[in-house]
Amino acid sequence: MGFLKGHSLAAFQEYAFTFNYRVITKDKKVISVLQRSTFFQDSSPNSVLASIGFLMDISNLKEDTKIIFTIEKIDKSYESHSLPPIYKSTFYPDKTYDVLSRREAEVLQCIHEGLSSKQIADKLFVSLNTVNNHRKNMLLKTKTSNTAELLNYSIKHGVI
């Protein structure tokens, strides 16, 4: 909302808003969908003529539960196939992921990148003991017994 408040209605048509989420169908099946929207302005500077969007079932492409919201500037020249997002935020609706602290998530990302505990400690400016405590806590919170299981769990559930 902060992004929208900081821009005029006229500027909205320069951006595409995309996010994914899960819905339950009438037959009680959970599917993942992608929603993408953009706006078109009326001749009046303070009104929006229309919002155009689409929904697409992406269940065959997405197996995790994380929700990703992006705001992208639309390349009207069509010279670039992909512009980097102006804003990107990731949410983890499954409560299992909420139990990892921000710092534990950073340590987990470093583990995923192949860094040793000593390298992680140096990178995050913490002691080796702190990194080892974060590792131990993540194993307990995710009910895994070693780093390989922790990484497998985090990839399978979309934590990293």
Image (cartoon, rainbow, N blue to C red):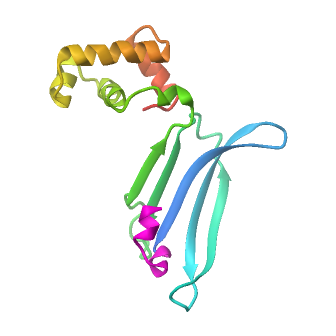
Q: What residue sits 53% from the left and 39% below the top?
A: 66
Q: Does the magenta-highlighted stretch encompass residue 6?
A: yes
Name the dominant secondary structure of the magenta segment.
helix
**Above-or-below relation of 144 to 24:** above
What stretch of residues is rendered in magenta? Answer: 1-13
Q: What residue sits 27% from the left and 13% below the top?
A: 132
Q: Nearer the viewer, residue 96 or 144?
A: 96
- Looking at the image, can residue 15 be seen? yes
Left or right, 109 with respect to 150, comes to left
Residue 114 in percent (x, y) is at 28, 23
Q: What residue sits 51% from the left and 37% below the top?
A: 92
Left or right, 138 with respect to 26, comes to left
**Above-or-below relation of 4 to 154:** below
Q: Identify the image quadrant of residue 71.
A: bottom left
Residue 81 in percent (x, y) is at 43, 62
Q: Nearer the viewer, residue 100 or 34?
A: 100
